[in-house]
């Protein structure tokens, strides 16, 4: 089930009704009930076949920092932020670990190259990354389980682009057709004027000829 590709826009849902969001300060991240905002949307950028980057609506990358989210805590509950690096490194990389879930179609853990996991904390709008002890991951650990909701895929973009292009081409064809009709109409009017002018000229000559004969 490899659904990940460049430019795929997703939401990351935690539990029943919380979404990972990029805060408006463009630095912190948290979770929120409202998944309809742009802040809850993350664009995927593939790094390689196994890892990816997640870009917020502010153009910044989800980052596993080495700073504690709670003062005094060392090597635990490390802060997750959004940053705009000059060059992306392993702190910006996430390895999706697919999980089977009978209810949600796309369920994953998000793991850093250093072995910590993206974690949401119950009761607080706190998002951290943490090592999970010697026994490794517990499949029942809901704190690190995220459900993917696809907002827009590249194929949707191309369909929209194709539809827009079709409308543009149709509009251009209509415009050219109308211009062609206008040109034909103008040429017809020009021909009618020339014909009328010739008739008037002929009538004047006929009138002069008739008058000369009468004299």
Image: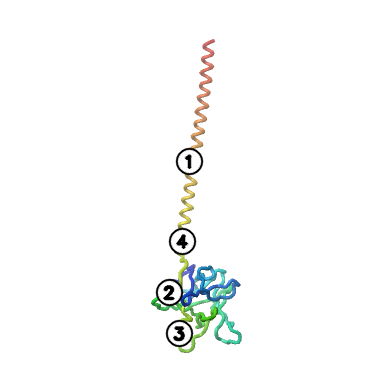
| Mark positioned earlier in the residue sequence (3 or 4) | 3
* Mark 2 crowdedness (10 Å alpha carbons): few <14, some 14-19, many ≥20: some
> Is label 3 in a helix, a strand or a loop?
loop
Residue 137: mark in rendering? 3
Q: Residue furthest bottom?
A: 134
Question: What is the CA distance from the residue labelled 3 to the residue labelled 1?
Answer: 72 Å
Query: Percent from the top left, x then y, of residue 193?
Result: 52, 30
Direction from residue 98 to residue 56 in the image, left or right: right
> Is label 1 in a helix, a strand or a loop?
helix
Question: What is the CA distance from the residue labelled 4 to the residue labelled 2?
Answer: 23 Å
Question: What is the CA distance from the residue labelled 1 to the residue labelled 4?
Answer: 34 Å
Q: Is residue 191 above or below residue 61?
A: above
Q: Residue furthest top?
A: 215
Asked whether 36 or 66 is in front, the reply is: 36
Instruction: Say which residue label 4 marks.
Output: 158
Asked whether 91 or 178 is in front, the reply is: 178
Instruction: Say which residue label 1 marks.
Output: 181
Number of the front mark, 3 or 1? 3
| Mark positioned earlier in the residue sequence (3 or 1) | 3
């Amino acid at each position: 089930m490899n659904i990940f590709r460049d430019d795929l826009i997703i939401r990351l849902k935690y539990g029943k009704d919380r979404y990972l969001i990029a805060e408006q300060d463009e630095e912190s991240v948290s979770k929120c009930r409202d998944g309809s905002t742009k802040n809850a949307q993350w664009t995927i950028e593939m790094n390689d076949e196994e890892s990816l980057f997640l870009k917020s609506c502010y153009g910044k990358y989800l980052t596993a920092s080495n700073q504690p989210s709670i003062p005094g805590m060392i090597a635990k509950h490390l802060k997750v932020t959004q940053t705009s690096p000059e060059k992306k490194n392993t702190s910006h990389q996430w390895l999706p670990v697919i999980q089977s879930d009978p209810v949600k179609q796309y369920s994953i853990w998000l793991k850093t190259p250093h072995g910590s996991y993206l974690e949401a904390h119950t009761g607080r709008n706190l998002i951290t990354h943490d090592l999970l002890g010697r026994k490794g991951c517990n499949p029942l650990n809901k704190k690190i389980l995220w459900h993917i909701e696809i907002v827009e895929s590249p194929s949707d973009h191309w369909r929209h682009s194709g539809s827009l292009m079709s409308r543009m081409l149709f509009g251009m064809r209509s415009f050219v057709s109308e211009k062609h009709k206008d040109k034909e109409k103008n040429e017809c009017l020009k021909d009618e004027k020339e014909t009328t002018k010739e008739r008037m000229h002929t009538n004047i000559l006929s009138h002069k000829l008739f008058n000369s004969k009468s004299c």
